[in-house]
Amino acid sequence: MANKHRGEIEAELGGVRRTLVLTLGALAELESAFGADDLVALTERIGAGRLKAMDLTRIIGAGLRGAGEAISDDEVARLVVEGGAQGYVRIAAALLAATFGDEP
C-alpha cells in the first residue's frame, strides 16, 4: 500500500497493482534523462506541460525503480495501462503531484 507521506502512489500497470515513488535517486535519473542541471530546471521542464511519450515512460520507470522494481524504460513502454495514453498521463501526473505538490 502506498504511503502518501513518502510521496508514494499506487497504479495498475500491466495488470499488476504497483507502487511508484520518485526518490532522490529517481529524481537524479530524471535530471540526467531530461538534461536538467538541477531540480528547478527539472520542474520547469516538466511544468511546461509538453511531455513526449518517452518522457512519460521515463517518469513512470523512474517511479517504479524508486519503489524497488527492477524494470527498464523499454519494459515500462510495453506495459498496458487502462485508459491508454490518458492513463499514462494520469499516472505520471499523480506521481509528480505526490513528489512536488500540485504544481510540479
Image: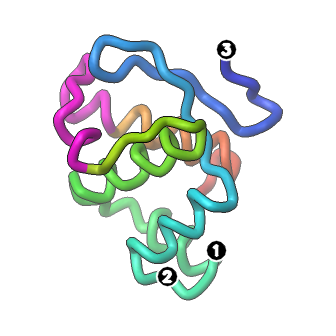
Q: CA distance from mark 2 to mark 3?
A: 31 Å
The reply to whether callout 1 and callout 2 are in contact (CB within 8 Å) is yes
Q: Which residue is mark 2?
A: 36
Image spot of residue 94 (x, y percent): 53, 36
Residue 80 in magenta?
yes
Residue 31 in magenta?
no
Q: Secondary structure at mark 3?
A: loop
Residue 26 figure quarter: bottom right
Q: Secondary structure at mark 1?
A: helix
Seen from the viewer's position, the closer of residues 102 and 94 is: 94
The tag on residue 39 is 1
Q: Say whether residue 7 is left or right of residue 63.
A: right
Question: Upstream in the sequence, badge 3 or badge 1?
Answer: 3
Q: CA distance from mark 3 to mark 1?
A: 27 Å
The reply to whether callout 3 and callout 1 are in contact (CB within 8 Å) is no
Q: Which residue is mark 3?
A: 1
Image spot of residue 21 (x, y percent): 61, 40
Magenta residues: mostly which secondary structure?
Answer: helix
Residue 55 figure quarter: bottom left
Q: Which residues are magenta?
A: 74-88
Look at label 1 and name its amino acid: Leu
Q: Where is the N terminus found, in terms of image quarters?
A: top right
Look at label 2 and name its amino acid: Ala
Q: Looking at the image, which residue is at 47% across and 51% down?
A: 62
Image spot of residue 46 (x, y percent): 46, 64
